[in-house]
């Protein structure tokens, strides 16, 4: 299939999918669609009771730094899904602009803010920095398992994440 046909098929599919709304004012399907069209994974996150799709990435322990991608809601959020974290593995954040805030949850998406939080000091520990990151921070996982880290920024924060 040549490129022109692929673009045409995508436009038709986007038109069909964008008509699927549960409520007239529900624009979360548009956000999910735009993220998917841009090649991003998504995670359903409920920061204030209403689920919305945010940009997500899946991290594996290979030491490669990944740029964080954000979705504008009322603040900017990003999800880092870690399907397998071994005990002793370290997550590193490096901030190049602004401030990042992190919250660590057990399991994968969907995520509801404040529900199923990983226990700081038990499941994980900050070996440097804190949940509010202005330059860098490192989290060590003490308990093996699946985790999702929700990253937010209110000031246009930019940074990278890597898992070792």
Image (cartoon, rainbow, N blue to C red):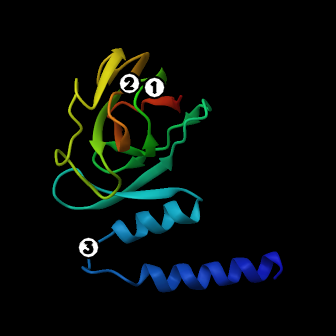
Residue carrying label 1: 90
- With 152 as the anchor, is 92 left or right in this view? right
**Quadrant holding the N terminus:** bottom right
Res 54 quadrant in image: bottom left
Residue drawn at (50%, 60%) of the image: 35
Spot occupied by residue 20 in the image (x, y as percentages of width and height) = 38, 83
Spot occupied by residue 9 in the image (x, y as percentages of width and height) = 66, 84
Residue drawn at (34%, 37%) of the image: 152
Residue 3 higher or lower than 69, as above or below:
below
Spot occupied by residue 45 in the image (x, y as percentages of width and height) = 29, 55
Closer to us: mark 3 or mark 1? 1
Q: Nearer the viewer, residue 70 or 60?
A: 60
Residue 31 higher or lower than 135, as above or below:
below
- With 4 as the anchor, is 94 left or right in this view? left
Closer to us: mark 2 or mark 3? 2
Proximity of marks 3 and 1: CB atoms separated by less than 8 Å: no
At label 1, counting other C-alpha atoms closer than 10 Å, the crowd grade (few under 14, some 14-19, many 20 or more) is many
């Amino acid at each position: 299939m040549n490129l022109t046909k692929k673009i045409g098929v995508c436009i038709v599919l986007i038109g069909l999918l964008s008509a699927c709304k549960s409520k007239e004012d529900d624009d979360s399907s548009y956000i999910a669609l735009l993220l998917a069209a841009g090649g991003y994974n998504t995670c359903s996150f409920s920061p204030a009771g209403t689920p919305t799709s945010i940009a997500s990435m899946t991290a594996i322990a290979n030491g490669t730094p990944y740029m964080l991608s954000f979705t504008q809601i009322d603040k900017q959020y990003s999800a880092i899904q870690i399907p397998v974290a071994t005990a002793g593995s370290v997550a590193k954040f490096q901030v190049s602009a602004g401030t990042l805030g992190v919250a660590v949850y057990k399991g994968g998406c969907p995520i509801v803010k404040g529900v199923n939080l990983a226990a700081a000091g038990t499941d994980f520990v900050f070996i440097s920095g804190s949940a509010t990151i202005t330059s860098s921070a490192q989290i060590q996982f003490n308990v093996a398992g699946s985790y999702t880290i929700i990253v937010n920024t209110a000031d246009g924060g930019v940074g990278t994440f890597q898992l070792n």
